[in-house]
Amino acid sequence: MINIFDFILPTKIRYGKGIIEVLGEELRLLNAKKVMVITDKGLAKTDMLKKLIFIIQKEGIDFVIYDAIEANPKDYNVEDCAAKAREISADTLVAFGGGSPIDAAKAVAVLAKQGGKVRDYQGKGKIKDDCLPLLTIPTTAGTGSEVTFSSVITDTKEKFKFTIKSTAIAAKTAIIDPELTLTVPPMTTAATGIDALTHAIEGYTANCTEPIAEAVGLYAVEYIAKNIVEAVKNGSNLEARDKMMMGSLLAGLSFSHADVASVHCMAEALGSIYDAPHGMCNSILLPYVMEYNLPEAGYKYARIARAMGIDEADDNKAAEKGIEHIKQLSREIGLPVIKSLNVNPDDFELLAEMSVKNGSNASNPRSVTKEDYVMLFNKAYND
Amino acid sequence: MINIFDFILPTKIRYGKGIIEVLGEELRLLNAKKVMVITDKGLAKTDMLKKLIFIIQKEGIDFVIYDAIEANPKDYNVEDCAAKAREISADTLVAFGGGSPIDAAKAVAVLAKQGGKVRDYQGKGKIKDDCLPLLTIPTTAGTGSEVTFSSVITDTKEKFKFTIKSTAIAAKTAIIDPELTLTVPPMTTAATGIDALTHAIEGYTANCTEPIAEAVGLYAVEYIAKNIVEAVKNGSNLEARDKMMMGSLLAGLSFSHADVASVHCMAEALGSIYDAPHGMCNSILLPYVMEYNLPEAGYKYARIARAMGIDEADDNKAAEKGIEHIKQLSREIGLPVIKSLNVNPDDFELLAEMSVKNGSNASNPRSVTKEDYVMLFNKAYND
């Protein structure tokens, strides 16, 4: 197969311990005069946010904090936030948080300038270039959203997660400081970490992937698989946190230039109906989808296994051992099983229908029908 | 070690067989009205250039061809070309060629707007943002210059190659079409291919490297090592050409976000004194520098060996086998030894002095003194 692809990275990445200090300098470069900081209620109370505000104030920049973004960000979160941004004439957005505030901020960047409802911007070519400039500061190692071009928002009326996507909503600048993750609790570290692993694996294996996305995706697998247990069990280990943050960034660069696939199709369906944490949904489903994909993705799964440290020359055996290793990692870091989300098996038909309709279904390395998805939900439920 | 780095990619990459067709569209996006096509005398006569001109004309864009760029581009090439660009009020540059026209065009992009001599722009912060927009179209799989921020120019008075570097001189757009390399002769394919391999290895192992540069560098090694023999021996094999072009791109992304190291320090010295092809100089010196670096770079060299397909669990053994494999590849593709460049051993002192002064000397994974460079030149000469 001969490669054909485009590669654009609209985001300037500044990565490192203590790099948050450059926030003032970077806001100046963006010519920010009136900043809206978009975050959630939990983070709004932290010393990290105080530090961030201190830096903005020191720079003499006017700011407002919007902290009402919920998990699995809702259409009304985005629309309310965008209205406030217009009201105060914000000229720059700073997203501070996990995937929810960052995804919400990307949608706010469009709505604040182009008006309307979030749902209006679903589909290719709907988002014009004129968006509010966005600076992202991730506080979890998982989302990758700080460098991706997409935003996943929940349509609360339809109970359906949908994606808007454009390089115009990507951050102009991402400030990625692993120190910000030192206080993330073990369960969140575990779920977001396996979320990042899912991004890496789906980015590396997606039908539409390309060699740059493959290279960073495969490298991300190594960073994450070799450090997730330590990051969960000893959260104050900066080296493990650094490696997880780096893995999440590499994974974000991978899937944004390829796509995610069936794990995300199923996880987004679960998140839509049960409002369950996205990372946790991914982490529960990942090994089952990998088992299903094995006949088509064996060679790449073998390479994934070797990147995780599995020494096995035979591709088939390596691939199988890799999947087993991921299951074992999930158990070791205490991730729950699907039943703990209070999932009702009667919903599997609906969840499968939502999964098959997901825009990333076509990117899965093995074709998946609605029936296959029902089977996969049942398998995860009964395991 | 905790990671700290910035990552910026100012170039939009469009890659693929036949992708040259998007040239018109991309020039329109750059708002080009008067294009200067910068190339060399050999390429000026090709059907490829005719096709490129046909596309520009079809778009109704005015253009001038400047074809006087020499190998190891000289200061006077750049200064003459920049004067012409000003004279005709060119608003966009298209670099078409191997590393020489592309490197020259980057320097022209500065001089045409900011005046002066090329040498004025050596050193950090000398190049201002206001450069002519540049679109690059590589015709060899080797340079990586289509996506890097640096340009290596020969100071003809001092007989010294120097580098100017800034994201401002990077291409706005790179159109990378492996079909353009189908007619590259075997010896050029060999030399430029090992040049790309050197970029990948030095980018992956440089002291100042970071994980994104490592990921793409290591992946590049695999692409290049597994396809170079076929590309040299069967130049019309598009799949091999595609893989080599992709390897060169990945390698360019790697070293531009890290650095090159001692192979380049020595090769640029050789190129300065003997005007020898850069790729060939690199290819001759690569295994000797690797042998020297072994005590410091063993683990990474082992990974490089495994990326080339060497199945060896012990790191030290793998690293040694990897170096041997590179020597063997060079022999298999018919690369010459250093004596064929008519090198005079009396010059080794001078060449070593130039190598140690090279800005990339500090990036080598093992520290190298002038005496070490003399030893390395002697070793390559007497082998």
Image (cartoon, coloured by chain):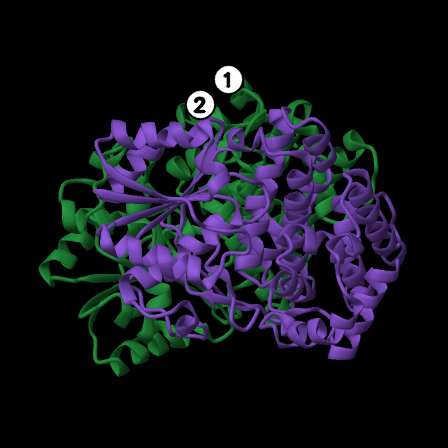
Chain colours: A purple, B green
Residue B51 pos. (x, y %):
36, 78
Residue B145 pos. (x, y %):
41, 51
Name the element at disc 2.
helix
Three-letter residue code for mark 2: Val
Quarter that holds the N terminus of chain A: bottom right
Could you say which is closer to the camera, residue B343 or residue A59?
A59
Q: Check disc 1 and report the residue beneath it.
A: B369
Spot the residue most to the bottom. B58
Q: Check disc 2 and report the residue beneath it.
A: B356
Task: Tell me the subunit letter for badge 1.
Answer: B
Quarter that holds the C terminus of chain A: bottom right
Give yes or no for contact between labels 1 and 2 (Cβ–Cβ under 8 Å): yes
Residue A373 falls in which quadrant of the image? Answer: bottom right
Instruction: Locate residue A286 relative to residue A195 in the image: left or right.
Output: right
Instruction: Locate residue A28 relative to residue A347 in the image: left or right.
Output: left
Mark-to-mark CA distance, 1 and 2: 7 Å
Residue B370 pos. (x, y %):
48, 18
How packed mark 1 is, by other alpha carbons closer than 10 Å (few <14, some 14-19, many 20 or more), is: some
Q: Earlier in the sequence, mark 1 or mark 2?
A: 2
Three-letter residue code for mark 1: Thr
Measured along the vertical axis of the image, is residue B231 above or below residue A216? below
Could you say which is closer to the camera, residue B71 or residue A266?
A266
